[in-house]
Image: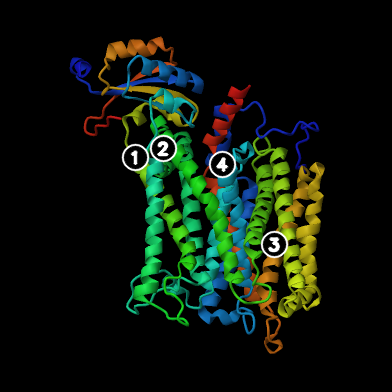
Amino acid sequence: MQLTQPQDPPGQSDYVLKPGHSYTSIGTKIAKIALDVRTPFGWVVGFGVGAILLTMYLISVGVLFARGIGVWGNNAPVFWGIPIVTFVWWIGIGHAGTLISAILFLLRQEWRTSINRFAEAMTLFAVACAGMYPILHMGRPWLFYWIMPYPNTFAMWPQFRSALAWDVFAISTYATVSALFWFVGLIPDLAGFRDRAKHPLLKFGYGILAMGWRGSARHWDRHQTLYLLLAAIATPLVVSVHTVVSFDFAISQMPGWHTTVLPPYFVAGAVFSGFAMVVTLMIPIRKLYKLEDMITLHHFDMMGKVLLATGLIVAYGYTTEFFTAYYGGNIYEVDMMNYRLGGAYAPFIWLLFACNIFSIQFLWFKRIRTNLWVMFVISLIINTGMWLERFMIVVISLTHDFLPASWGLFQATAWDMSLMFGSLGLFLVLLLLFVRTLPMISVFEMQELIHTQESHH
Amino acid sequence: MSAAHATGKEYFGLLAEFSDPDELVARTRQAYEAGYRHMDAYAPFPIHGLSDALGIKGNLVPLIVGMAALFGGVGGFLLQYWTSVFAYPLNIAGRPLNTWPAFMVITFETAVLSAGILGVVGMLALNNLPQPYHPLFRIPQFQAASTDKFFLCIFETDPRFDLEKTRAFLEGLGPDSITEVEQDETTKVYD
């Protein structure tokens, strides 16, 4: 299987959209992905794998509900185990979608256009996977609404000085605004689908979702203003989300958590892992739907650069953490850092450094950034590395606090693992259903891109 | 109204079809210069300069988003202030009850949440969406307005609208086709 385009002569791959597309051809090609009755075999295989993992997830949730949190490895001293690690990991992955759709939009980066819709969907589903964890972690998940402020018969209110209460607001706001941003972008494309679909039921379904959009210039005017404003509010929002998640740790006293570097390095790590996930998903999907003309090597070149930049920020974060601990000389902090480098979990830490610092050094070279096999492998390594980073922060810190008497080791159970890998199934199933039914590349923004390119020449 | 009386039909407007976005902008500008005001242009994607050509001067979306953000931020802060100071005060070593720096995160989040939700609702409301029925949806060619064609429609409500004269004017613009858009008998739509 050849992943790079053989017809691309070297140095000729620097376009964001292969020349020769018209308004009609681009729309038809994108719509065909969802409207074609035939489903590619690769999609069926992916969906099958996703469905199996999702079944495992549902069984794990069932067992959890029936038997309680005790099925997990959570026990003294580690009461935040694999579920919280995976929660932080998923939330981080979501960040790339908002970054691509909002921040790169404000920065007028043309290459974002063909990947933003897909990345936004990835955000939504990653946040859905993440959002399940705190609820499942509650022990009595059916009482999850107790975390929201509402008048109740106990006359109780949430503790708004707690980072956990902030987290509820940050994540629910992020999920809502991401969904709105995604849907507002989808409306015109849904209208296009309504008018392209042949089957009356599909026409009806897309028609209801498009809400009667007819491309009026007055509507476009308000739509585009809102889109810009949503991008403008989503930008600080996305930075705030992982900052607030990092506050869950940073405002506590735990050695390894109690550090001011956590918020910026969480945000950089989030973008880092999110872009890695976009690369992981884009490479097979581009191949499956033959999107080489819209998602070009230039895109992977750019994403490789973002991975390198954010990865270096993450590496700087690790360095700062170690430096401040050793320079500050606080015995608990120094001990935590020594424990990380040489304690029971040291192999994890060194693997983490290999994944997140060493592997990205290859991305300095354009030949590597445009070699999709290597990019795919590096993106998987980064995804693993970022999970290990969250494991380092959450679990390793908890096993080794102030008192030697409360030190201990953490052991995950099979249910921890099945829920974690199962959540990949939830993600995969949602994502593949999205690809199969909705415009996974923004048609109107691609047409707009053709229009601007034509007026430039 | 004279046209409606003459033929016994009531019209929504006259629809001209173009196949190039820049042409649509130029022709819309010509129609505006000819004095037509009650009209709209339709395109599958936003075209720079089209709002200008139609004489659209800004919209209310920024105001709605701004007010919504203010409302959400103030509301979010007051919720925390009221619960922490009055409804459920917790005296922790005599520290102040109004710990406003700790309230800033949720204040920001509620501001963004309110701006996002009310912004979308406001945009849809101003656009009069959802609107499942529209006379233009009965025109077969108009399906392409969401895919690859560009339309200009002069509404019957325009004071200068006259079926014959407006038609002649639109023909002078050199469109691919001109269609008379009729009103439905029961559901009247004017823009």
A212 over B149 or under it: above or below:
below
On the image, the x and y values in percent for residue A131 come to: 53, 64
Numbered disc in front, either 2 or 4: 4
Q: What residue is drawn where x is 70% and y is 59%?
A: A383
Q: What amino acid type is highlighted by mark number 3?
A: Met
The reply to whether dot 3 and dot 4 touch (C-beta < 8 Å) is no
Chain assignment, label 3: A
Q: CA distance from mark 2 to mark 4?
A: 17 Å
On the image, the x and y values in percent for residue A212 come to: 37, 38
Q: Which residue is mark 3?
A: A386
Q: Which residue is mark 2?
A: A222
Q: Which residue is mark 4?
A: A106
A118 over A133 or under it: above or below:
above
Q: What amino acid type is highlighted by mark number 1?
A: Leu
Q: CA distance from mark 3 to mark 2?
A: 40 Å
A301 left or right of A176? right
The reply to whether dot 2 and dot 1 touch (C-beta < 8 Å) is yes
Q: Are marks 3 and 4 on the same chain?
A: yes
On the image, the x and y values in percent for residue A5 come to: 75, 36
Element type where label 2 sits in the image: helix
